[in-house]
Image (tube, rainbow, N blue to C red):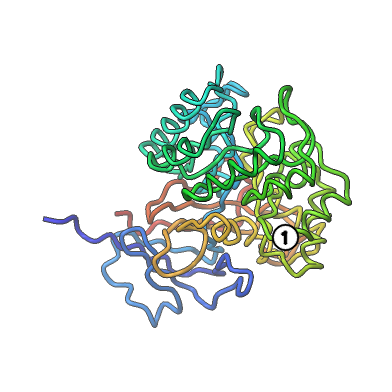
Amino acid sequence: MSDPQQKLVIRNIGLLLSGKMEEPILDADCLIAIDGKISAWGREGDLDCEGATTLIDANGTTLAPGLIDSHVHPVIGDYTPRQQQLHWIDSTLHGGVTTLISAGEVHMPGRPKDVVGLKAMAIAAQRWYENFRPSGVKVHAGAPVIEHGMVEQDFKDLADAGVKLLGEVGLGTVKDGKTAKQMVEWARKYGIQSTIHTGGPSIPGSGLIDADMVLETGADVIGHINGGHSALPDDQIICLCESCTKGLEIVHNGNERAALLTLNTARELKQMNRIILGTDGPAGSGVQPLGILRMVAMLSSLGHVPAEVAFCFANGNTARERDLDTGLIEAGMCADFVLMDQAQHSGGKTMLDSVELGNLPGIGMTIIDGVITSERSRNTPPATRLPIIVRRG
């Protein structure tokens, strides 16, 4: 016999954010998910809410698609040797992030740089995060850093084994545009998405990747366009925004002024849909459990972006750039959510007002694939209101 249907009903939603810049706020106070997938949303009286195996009273809080960190450097499990820290992914979940995307497992001690070794490590990393989700968080990993000596067959082998990402182009021995372009094209041919390092060296051994190499390489995502850590000169950042159509990734561990320059340029181009967010951690700056929330608040408050749009940078825009099945309120998408409210005693009349003033919201709950994965956050400021679990399946 098949397992009984799992039905999640979230009622009494105060504000439903969609993740879509074209319609960031939805007219709804209730949402239903069946077997971990979004089924319906709207007014509670118009929906079939009977038979819920899990019933949540949102208590007037805001529900948004779970946040996505587009740029992390995991290694294995919920441990990072870069900072000798355990449970950094669990802490990130408490910052409202339900999905992480690897830009390369570069902090593995003794990381192999020969072709056989780097392929083996990428496949292993893809497997262990596919088989184990720390605290329920989805980690898209197994992102090999390209090295000299790789040939087309290597990219086919990686794709056949389930690898779907390249680590940051430029972190390995391949630092010329011609070679990188060829390898990026091989990767794309076999369905592997690429990200390129942008800016000055991040750690000893890495190097400068300027606008000319970024444009010549043609990677799918311009990784940390605001520097990781050091940003390119203003004219090069503007050139990248104007001269390509790739994702413009802004990270926490970068240059805040360059982040605002990128935002303002994208707005002038009417292409803010290209903006996606990451933390670029764990790294020398440490781990930033609230990094994505802080980027939303910073870009909204200093960049004069409505908070409901800034949240789209952190979920829907990334979902579309990365071709994910999460990050948007759409039928059939994964039921990955964050419930949040205005932080206690923060300025503004509403949660969105407060974020536009530069404040972080308080996280009250996260849900992944329709399952409650965390309740009141131990990391954010306390929320004014908290969702209530009426029934838990």
Question: Which of the 4 quarters of the picture holds residue 145?
Answer: top right
Indicate the position of residue 388 as horizontal and vertical percent values.
44, 57
Q: Which of these two is toward me, 103 or 309?
A: 103
Quarter occupied by the N terminus: bottom left
Above or below 194: residue 392: below
Query: Residue at (80%, 64%) from the top-left corner?
Result: 304
Question: Type of residue at label 1?
Answer: Ser
Q: Position of residue 197 (x, y in %)?
A: 69, 40
Q: Is residue 92 left or right of residue 275?
A: left
Q: Residue furthest top?
A: 110
Q: Residue at x 70, y 54 (%)?
A: 248
Q: Quadrant of the C terminus?
A: bottom left
Residue at left offset 26%, top offset 68%: 51
Most distant residue in the left direction: 1
What x and y, as percent, mark residue 128? 40, 33
Count residues near mark 1 (Cα–Cα under 10 Å), then give few for <14, some for 14-19, many for 20+. Answer: many
| Residue that label 1 marks | 354
